[in-house]
């Protein structure tokens, strides 16, 4: 059960975006299938393609977080992974450079889970809401414009020049708001994201998305910590937060 005093103190709720607010797997699958129909491409498992693309995400970020690589924007990491997997799916010669650049923008056009926008609109009536995401400013702004996500403002990785779970991301979010850490709540479908936020004093809300990775899901089937709020949807979060 959420701590009522903790909820009372919260002024802003910031959200992990990939997987928590948006359905990246379903979105990439659908956009890939639409592209295949347009190009007359057959025999590609686009759901597997989406999962393979995402599989390069955390390793790509880790090289930056660990200092093995200088700051690198997420769009570059996504494009590098795209170039790796196109041959694996028999697509190495099916797209020109302009088409590949546009495919890389699939991540800018992700669709939200059905409960996300209704829940965010409710939360917005009482709290400041924003993404706290590893996406770039342009990615997150484009996604919001495309999907109608009603953010009050955007926290992007290029704003912090760091990726979660780097503590600086959470610290900077609090610092820019000019509030105390306990007045900011992170909502996420990933227990390790919440653990990193809690270490910096933020309040925490777990939103369960057990189908995010499909066949590749190996964790985050349920909350593994005593987070301040544990719910199944963003609408449930809004209810628990008094909206």
Image (spheres, rainbow, N blue to C red):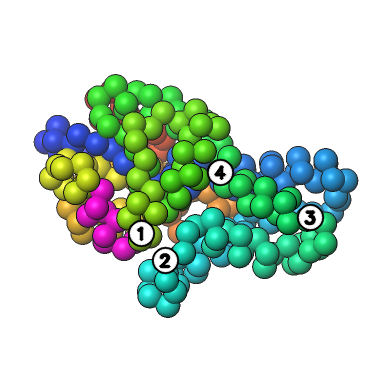
Decide: marks 2, 1 in contact (CB < 8 A)? yes
Residue 235 is at least partly visible in this image: no
- Counting every numbered tag in the picture gives 4
In this picture, which residue range is highlighted in magenta?
164-173
Q: Magenta stretch containing residue 168, yes or no?
A: yes
Q: Which mark is residue 95?
A: 3
Q: Main SS of the magenta segment?
A: helix
Q: Secondary structure at mark 3?
A: loop
Q: CA distance from mark 3 to mark 1?
A: 32 Å
In the image: residue 187, left or right of residue 28: left
Q: Position of residue 235 (x, y in %)?
A: 39, 29
Relative height, residue 59 to residue 23 (above, below): below
Q: Magenta stretch containing residue 242, yes or no?
A: no
Looking at marks 4 and 1 on the same chain, the residue that comes earlier in the sequence is marked by: 4
In the rendered image, which quarter contains the C terminus? top left
Q: CA distance from mark 4 to mark 1?
A: 19 Å
Residue at the limit of the structure toward the bottom, as seen here: 68
Closer to the eye: label 4 or 1: 1
In the image: residue 94, left or right of residue 145: right
Residue bearing the label numbered 4: 108
Q: CA distance from mark 3 to mark 2?
A: 28 Å
The residue that appears at 70% across and 54% down in the rendered structure is: 100
Residue bearing the label numbered 1: 161
Q: CA distance from mark 2 to mark 4?
A: 20 Å
Decide: marks 3, 1 in contact (CB < 8 A)? no
Residue bearing the label numbered 2: 71
Task: Give the crowd class for mark 2: few <14, some 14-19, many >=20 residues within 10 Å.
Answer: some
Q: Position of residue 128 (x, y in %)?
A: 27, 32
Looking at marks 3 and 1 on the same chain, the residue that comes earlier in the sequence is marked by: 3
């Amino acid at each position: 059960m959420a701590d009522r005093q903790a909820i009372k103190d919260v002024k802003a709720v910031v959200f992990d975006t990939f997987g928590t607010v948006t359905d990246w797997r379903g979105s990439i699958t659908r956009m890939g299938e639409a592209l295949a129909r347009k190009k007359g491409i057959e025999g590609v498992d686009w759901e597997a393609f989406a999962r393979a693309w995402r599989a390069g995400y955390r390793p790509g970020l880790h090289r930056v977080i660990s200092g093995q690589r200088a700051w690198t924007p997420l769009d570059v990491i996504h494009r590098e992974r795209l170039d790796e997997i196109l041959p694996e799916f028999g697509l190495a010669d099916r797209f020109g450079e302009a088409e590949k650049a546009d495919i890389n923008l699939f991540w800018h056009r992700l669709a939200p889970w059905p409960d996300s926008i209704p829940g965010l609109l409710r939360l917005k009536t009482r709290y400041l809401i924003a993404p706290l995401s590893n996406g770039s400013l342009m990615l997150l702004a484009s996604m919001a414009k495309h999907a109608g996500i009603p953010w009050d403002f955007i926290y992007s990785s290029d704003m912090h020049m760091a990726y979660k779970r780097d503590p600086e991301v959470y610290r900077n979010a609090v610092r820019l708001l000019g509030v105390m850490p306990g007045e900011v709540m992170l909502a996420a479908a990933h227990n390790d994201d919440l653990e990193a936020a809690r270490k910096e004093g933020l309040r925490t809300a777990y939103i369960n998305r057990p189908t995010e990775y499909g066949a590749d899901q190996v964790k985050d089937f349920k909350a593994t910590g005593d987070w301040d709020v544990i719910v199944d949807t963003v609408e449930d979060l809004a209810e628990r937060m008094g909206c």
